[in-house]
Each structure stands twice: as C-alpha cells, then as structure tokens.
Image (tube, grey):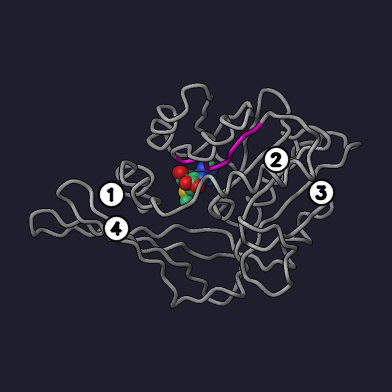
C-alpha cells in the first residue's frame, strides 16, 4: 500500500476521518473573505478538493464550482457529492484551467502538498495564470518554525461494526523546506486491529518566507486561523488564513 493510502486505497475512510470538521463554517468564512476582497464573480476552483465537501457548499452558495485533485478515488466520491461540478485529475503544482476564474481555494493545509519550494512557486504561478484580474486565492498554512512534533490530533468513531481511530500530526526536523504530515488509521473489527501509517512529504516555510515568495505577484493579507471570526493575523500564531489578490492590471505570467 502506498504512503498516500488515505487518498487512494483507503479513500472511502476519508470522510469518516473528517467527520468533526465544520466544512460549512470554513466555506462560509472564505465566501465572506471573497465578498470583501474579490471582484463579485462566482467562478471557483478548489485545489486538492478531495471528496468535494467545500465544492458542495460553494455550489450551494451560487458559485460555478469545480475541483482538482491528484487522486482519482477522491474525485470519484466528490463527483457523487457534487454532480453539477466538473473535477479533473491534476497536480496543483502545475495545473491549467479552461477559463480564468474569480476564486481559487485550497483547504486543510493542502497547499503544503506542493512538495518543495520550487513546486510551491510553480503552484502560485499556475494560480496566477488561472485567476482573472482581481481574482482571489485563499488557503491555510502552518509556519514551520511553530510546529510542535509532539502534537497529534486524535479522533475515534464507529461505522457499523468497525471502530476507527485516526491520528494526524506535523513533523518538521528544524532545518530546510520540507515537513511531513504523519497520519495513522486504526480499524478494529471483531477483535482484529489493522493499522495503516501514512507519511506525506510537504513543503515547509515560515510566514516571512511565504510572504516574500508571494508578494511580488499578489496583494497578500493574513488572517487568524479562525473560521468563525475574521481577525487579522496577530503576528504570533503558527497557523493562518492567507488571502492573495491578483492585481487588476496584471498581464498573464509566462511559464517558468
Ligand atoms: C488533506 S486532504 C484535503 C481534502 C479536502 N480539501 C478537504 O478539506 O477535505 C488533501 C487532498 O490533496 C490531494 N493532493 C495531494 N497532493 C496533491 C497535489 N500535488 N495536487 C493536487 N491534489 C493533491 C489529496 O489527494 C487529498 O485529496
């Protein structure tokens, strides 16, 4: 089984792992931010959309919403959840769209799936190319210097006769621009326990490095990682919501 099993062979367990996530609050918060910073347009793409929970909410808000993801099993579930939307198997580090968009989102720290700084920069260039002037890109991030390797989120739930325990946590060695997301899934059925361990390589940056990379091409705003209140980032928290606005008069970027 791959080191990404949760998004491939075990994709049917993904929504179970995320059952405590308030997708509506997240989507509504980004909708409010888009109302503040955006251009009133309603075309939307979600990067690393997974099983499509945010796409569902954006469609219900009246957006023409679509999603992309690297893993087809996740998109198969998304398509059932959102029959109106179009989904494509693409890598967010290098994606294209048919028509420029008003809003691009990337939730649940999935922007870190750009594996390395060069891929992150390529992703930002793809986003820039894919947005209309005045278009907005929203994502959430963790500052590598604020990661506590000891912290894990643990969540248990039951499905029919099976008991599940999910754990997830960041790991950063303290050097360089790579971090890992460590995930484990434990399934107990009729006294038998199976355990899967995933380790996902991801890009790591400090917020200072992030702003330096993004600011030349976007107007950048950081908010506290709180989907219920819109508060400017306090310059201390290790998690943040990032809003990038493409300038109204920007010419399309060429590749490279
Ligand atoms: C943590 S899940 C988030 C899914 C969804 N956004 C949510 O909030 O539930 C990360 C998703 O990113 C996808 N992914 C990982 N690497 C990717 C890449 N390079 N390009 C596009 N999608 C990627 C995975 O397949 C997975 O569906």
Query: In what quadrant of the picture does the C terminus appear?
Result: top right
Q: Residue at x 48, y 70 (%)?
A: 171
Of pointers 2 and 1, the one earlier in the residue sequence: 1
Indicate if the residue with disc 3 has its beta carbon within 8 Å of ligand 1: no
Q: Nearer the viewer, mark 1 or mark 3?
A: 3
Seen from the viewer's position, the closer of residues 228 and 111 is 228
Q: Of label 3 and label 2, which has the lower sequence position?
A: 2
The residue under label 1 is 1
Classify mark 1: residues with Cα within 10 Å, few (<14), some (14-19) or many (20+). Answer: few
Q: Quadrant of residue 245?
A: top right
- Residue position marked by numbered label 4 in the rendering: 185
Q: Earlier in the sequence, mark 4 or mark 3?
A: 4
Crowding at dot 3, Cα within 10 Å, few <14 / some 14-19 / many 20+, comes out as many
Please rate how many residues cluster around mark 2, counting C-alpha atoms within 10 Å: few if below 14, some from 14 to 19, many from 20.
many
Q: Which label number is shown at residue 218?
A: 3
Category of crowding for the residue at label 4, using alpha-carbon neighbours closer than 10 angstroms: few (below 14), some (14–19), many (at least 20): many
Reply above or below: 122 against 177. Answer: above
SS under mark 3: strand
- Checking the image for residue 170, the label placed there is none
Q: Name the residue located 83 percent from the left edge and 34 percent from the top edge.
A: 133
User: Do the residues under discs 4 and 3 have CB atoms within 8 angstroms?
Assistant: no
Asked whether disc 4 touches disc 2, contact meaning CB atoms under 8 Å apart, the reply is: no
Tell me the distance, in whole angstroms, between the alpha carbons under discs 2 and 1: 32 Å
x then y, percent, for residue 209: 73, 65
As measured in the structure, the alpha-carbon distance from the residue carrying label 4 to the one carrying label 2 is 33 Å
From mark 1 to mark 4, how far is it between C-alphas? 13 Å
Q: Which mark is in front, 4 or 2? A: 4
Residue farthest left in this picture: 190
Q: Earlier in the sequence, mark 1 or mark 3?
A: 1
Q: Dots 1 and 3: beta carbons under 8 Å?
A: no
**Residue matched to label 2:** 127
Which one is earlier in the sequence, the residue at label 4 or at label 2? 2
């Amino acid at each position: 089984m791959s080191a990404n099993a949760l998004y491939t062979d075990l994709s049917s367990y993904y929504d179970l792992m995320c059952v405590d996530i308030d997708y509506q609050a997240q989507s509504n918060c980004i909708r409010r931010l888009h109302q503040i910073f955006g251009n009133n347009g309603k075309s939307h793409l979600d990067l690393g959309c997974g099983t499509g929970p945010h796409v569902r909410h954006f469609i219900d808000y009246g957006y023409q919403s679509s999603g992309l993801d690297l893993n087809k099993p996740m998109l198969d579930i998304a398509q059932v959840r959102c029959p109106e939307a179009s989904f494509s198997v693409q890598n967010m580090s290098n994606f294209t769209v048919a028509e420029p968009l008003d809003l691009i989102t990337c939730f649940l720290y999935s922007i870190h799936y750009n594996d390395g700084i060069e891929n992150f920069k390529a992703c930002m260039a793809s986003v820039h190319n894919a947005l209309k002037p005045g278009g907005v890109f929203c994502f959430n991030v963790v500052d590598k210097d604020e990661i506590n390797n000891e912290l894990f989120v643990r969540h248990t739930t039951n499905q029919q006769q099976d008991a599940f325990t999910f754990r997830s946590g960041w790991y950063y060695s303290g050097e360089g621009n790579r971090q890992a997301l460590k995930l484990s899934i434990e399934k107990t059925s009729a006294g038998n326990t199976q355990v899967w361990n995933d380790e996902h390589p991801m890009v790591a940056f400090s917020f200072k490095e992030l702003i330096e990379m993004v600011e030349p091409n976007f107007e950048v705003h950081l908010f506290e990682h709180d989907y219920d209140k819109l508060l400017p980032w306090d310059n201390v928290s290790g998690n943040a919501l990032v809003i990038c606005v493409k300038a109204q008069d920007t010419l399309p970027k060429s590749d490279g």
